[in-house]
Image (cartoon, helix red, strand yellow):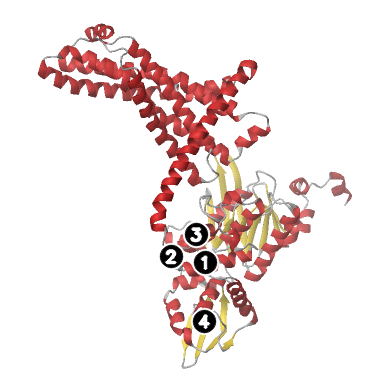
Amino acid sequence: MNTAPKLDRNAHTVRLSGEWTLAALVRVPRMRAELLVAGDAENWDLSAVTRLDSAVAVLLWRVWRGRFPAGLEISSALRATLERVAELSAGEGRAAARDGWSPGSLVAAPARRLGAFVLGVLKNGFGLVELLGRLVLALGFLCRHPKSVPWKEFSANIYKSGVEALPVSALVGFLIGVTISYLSALQLKAYGADLFIVNILGIGVVRELGPVLVAVLVAGRSGSAMTAQIGVMRVTEEIDALATMGVSNTLRVVLPKVAALVLVMPLLVVWSSASALLGGALAAWWQLDFSLLYFFAALPDAVPVANLWIGIGKGAVFGGLISLLACHFGLHVRPNTESLSRRTTASVVTAITLVIIADAIFAVFTRNVGIPF
Amino acid sequence: MSESPFDMSASISIPVIELCGVWSQYRDVVIHKNLDFRVDAGAVVALVGGSGSGKTTLLREILGLLKPTRGSVRLFGHDLFTPDALLQRDMRRRLGMLFQQGALFSALSVYDNIAFPLRELRFLDEDWIHELVRLKLDVVELTLAHARLMPAELSGGMIKRVALARALALEPELLLLDEPTAGLDPARSQSFVRLIRHLQQTLNLTVVLVTHDMDTIYGLDCEVALLAEQRILTRGNLDAVRAFPHPATRQFFNIPESLRSGG
């Protein structure tokens, strides 16, 4: 018994037989072409069709240009399938279903996009201010009710964004230290200014590179993790579940993350800077025959201690920025996968951009502090 | 015999699903022990059993999402774990699955969710797809007005309907349902069961479902297969399974001890 779709044609009649289903058509694509060619025929005999699914019914209806042909032989069951298709396509116009393209959109589109961008930035700005306000309120609440301080979450966040980041920040710091020291040593040797390697490395790493480097690392590591975590908590309605139990998400979710990062970032900056200085000292020893002892003895004279305070202060501010942005973007994830990925990207990119802007502002306001001579 | 999945002449006698001597093991826990399960074309079978009896595992094995430790799974007469990727794909196109939570693609609208399997065929043009999506929506008693909504904007009942429309998009011969009425209110659950029943009869589907809900079993007029002791303990209509003398039936159907001994 052969049940593949078959089409026979004579002068007036088209005869279909066999199994006319989507699956069968996909397998024998030429049947679709033959059906389209046969479209003008007046008489159709479908009495030998064993199966007709709605996909093929739609195709037939299109081949027939939206009306039953003059002569049609068909079993009542198959006719019912066709009539359902007919009924539906009569019910509604085609045009309503698709978006129209208006000629003005060529000019309007970029303007609209710019407007949407500006509005988006404003909206995020307001959202950040709002979140900051809620954090302040939560802190005020904690001052009056010290029992509800979320110590556990705080400590878990310190471990996750601080302790677990130690190896990678040490490694990155060390390698950057080696690289900068090595490259500067080559230049300084040419001028016989070997001694200044301590100044360059010390000021550069402690004041600028350390904080920014750690900020980029932490934004990529902890910022993205925070956004994704809060985002999924929103998708799975865990945030709402917290609220129904009378637990404020600002207090229990956002505050521990922000507090932990504000505390941990300066420590990471010190750790990473120390590692960079060690790497730099080793490279100087290797390139310029500086003893390690001399390098670290000369460091306090070359780098006034104010630089360390600036570095630590930057660390705290960057940490606050990164975690605030991460929580803000996380809390505004809409419940779908696309939004989650967009928001996580936005969180990291915005955090790194704002960190660099903040760093520039720091540079302007501390230009007279901590530079020797 | 030809190894083509479209060989319809064979499908009359060959069972739609055939599991032979299936063992499933998760670490040290044996879930299925030498389990045999066979579903013929046009049958409606409900898998029931207590929590942890391996209903979902069995469903996942039929779907090919999980490979049993031992034994064979055959769909439409072909080994499900054949290395032939095309044959596997064609086999999967002949079944539709309704996941418990719908598993709609959250980044796609209702329209695109239903159109997704149709577009995957790379055979239909967009107008054709449009008509078909409208038909499928109509089948599950939704309209094009719902098509633009995102899954997150749908109610639980609507998610089930859209997921069913997506499962039916390719006109499958086999429909698998995981807890089809879980999370629906009684009225919706009843109308959803009626809808599935109607579709099963008009499209002559083979349906295998996992459920806890007696009303669903009554409504679909299912054959019942009770999973216990790591195998299909008994199989038959609801009353026969209910009367089967075994602690598992008593526990599952919550029949008091006194009634059992009295009857």
The disc placed on residue B122 is 2
Residue drawn 49% across the image and 92% down it? A12
The x and y percentages for residue B99 are 59, 52
Name the mark nearer the viewer: 3 or 4.
4
The amino acid at mark 3 is: Phe
Compare marks 3 and 1 and give the one earlier in the sequence: 3
Disc 4: which residue = A64
Instruction: Give the label on residue B28, or none.
Output: none
Chain under numbered label 1 = B
Q: CA distance from mark 2 to mark 3?
A: 10 Å
Q: Does residue A353 sit above or below B36 in this rendering?
A: above
Identify residue type, mark 2. Arg
- Marks 3,4: beta carbons within 8 A: no
- Discs 3, 1: same chain: yes
Q: Do the numbered discs 3 and 1 sit on residues whose CB atoms are within 8 Å? A: no
| Residue picked out by circle 1 | B130
| Mark earlier in primary sequence (1, 2) | 2
Q: Give the residue pinned by disc 3.
A: B116
Tell me which residue sits at (59%, 23%) in the image: A138
Work out whether A87 lies above or below A143.
below
Contact check, label 2 and label 3, Cβ < 8 Å: no
- Please identify the residue farthest to the right as the structure is shown: B262
Disc nearer the start of the sequence (2/3): 3
Q: Is residue B6 visible?
A: no
Q: Is residue B133 left or right of residue A182?
A: right
Q: Quadrant of residue B176?
A: bottom right
Question: Whole-Å distance between the Cαs marked 4 and 1?
Answer: 17 Å
Give coordinates of residue B125: x percent, y percent.
45, 68
Classify mark 1: helix, strand or loop.
helix
Mark 3 crowdedness (10 Å alpha carbons): few <14, some 14-19, many ≥20: some
Vertical comparison of A265 with B199: above or below: above
